[in-house]
Image (tube, grey):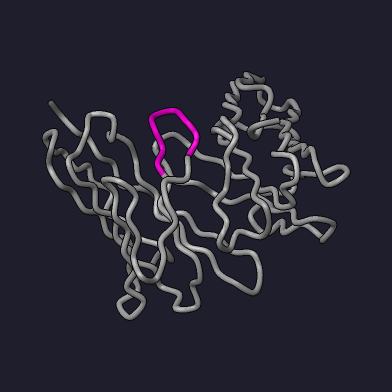
Amino acid sequence: GAGVSQSPSNKVTEKGKDVELRCDPISGHTALYWYRQSLGQGLEFLIYFQGNSAPDKSGLPSDRFSAERTGGSVSTLTIQRTQQEDSAVYLCASSLAQGDNYGYTFGSGTRLTVV
Amino acid sequence: RKEVEQDPGPFNVPEGATVAFNCTYSNSASQSFFWYRQDCRKEPKLLMSVYSSGNEDGRFTAQLNRASQYISLLIRDSKLSDSATYLCVVTYTGGFKTIFGAGTRLFVKA
């Protein structure tokens, strides 16, 4: 597609439930990133995929968070046993290659609310 | 000290004004620099890259000062539609590391 597509756009879930967030990057973009942004805060890096290399998971806040990228394209971010502090906008971005000299294109995000 | 620091603002300016934002970074190995714009409740969007020689895109001018480790964004003839949060972004070579600043809020008023 023309842009980065994320789904769902909004998700309300009960505390303790698992959620899956999906990101479909721009075709041909080898690098894919997940960030989250709490209300009024900056972007917090979560995880980065580059081609077939092992992902950089250094930003995942706990072992309840995991992500995969199938076939070098679509990525799924899974949050298990959600907590209220997980409420945020989860943003996915892709770029042609590793971030240097290439800007990112962000999806419109998934707004997650844990009640 | 944060790796990328920005004045959070807000900057409140009248239409037509010139406004400048600075962003400082702590790692001298920083390689690439960008300014992003984020509208309220929207995703960030790339505004412009920042090149060593400085670059201009219409009313927007970006500068890089490697010696002092800061980048700047100058907006001339501000428009109401320029109201947004401006994010400074710094990346490094040799491995993935991209740092987003927390952003500077700009309000342009009629």
Q: Which residues are magenta?
A: B37-44
With respect to residue B12, does A29 lie above or below?
below
Nearer to us in this view, A89 or A105: A105
Q: In the rendered view of the protein, which quadrant contains the N terminus of chain B?
A: bottom left
Q: Quadrant of residue A7?
A: top right
Q: Quadrant of residue B81?
A: top left
Q: Is residue B39 left or right of residue B75?
A: right
Q: Residue at x 49, y 65 (%)?
A: B32
Instruction: Please check the rendered image and state whether residue B43 is part of the magenta-colored stretch, yes or no.
Output: yes
Nearer to us in this view, A115 or A99: A99
Q: Residue at x 47, y 62 (%)?
A: B90
With respect to residue B79, does B32 lie above or below?
below
Q: Is residue B51 left or right of residue A58?
A: left
Instruction: Please check the rendered image and state whether residue B84 is part of the magenta-colored stretch, yes or no.
Output: no
With respect to residue A98, does B95 lie above or below?
below
Q: Quadrant of residue A18?
A: top right
Residue B84 pos. (x, y %): 32, 36
Nearer to us in this view, B60 or A108: B60
Nearer to us in this view, A4 or A82: A4
With respect to residue A12, does B21 lie above or below?
below
Q: Is residue A102 left or right of residue A64?
A: left
Residue B75 pos. (x, y %): 23, 47
Q: Predominant secondary structure in magenta?
A: loop
Q: Residue at x 83, y 47 (%)?
A: A72
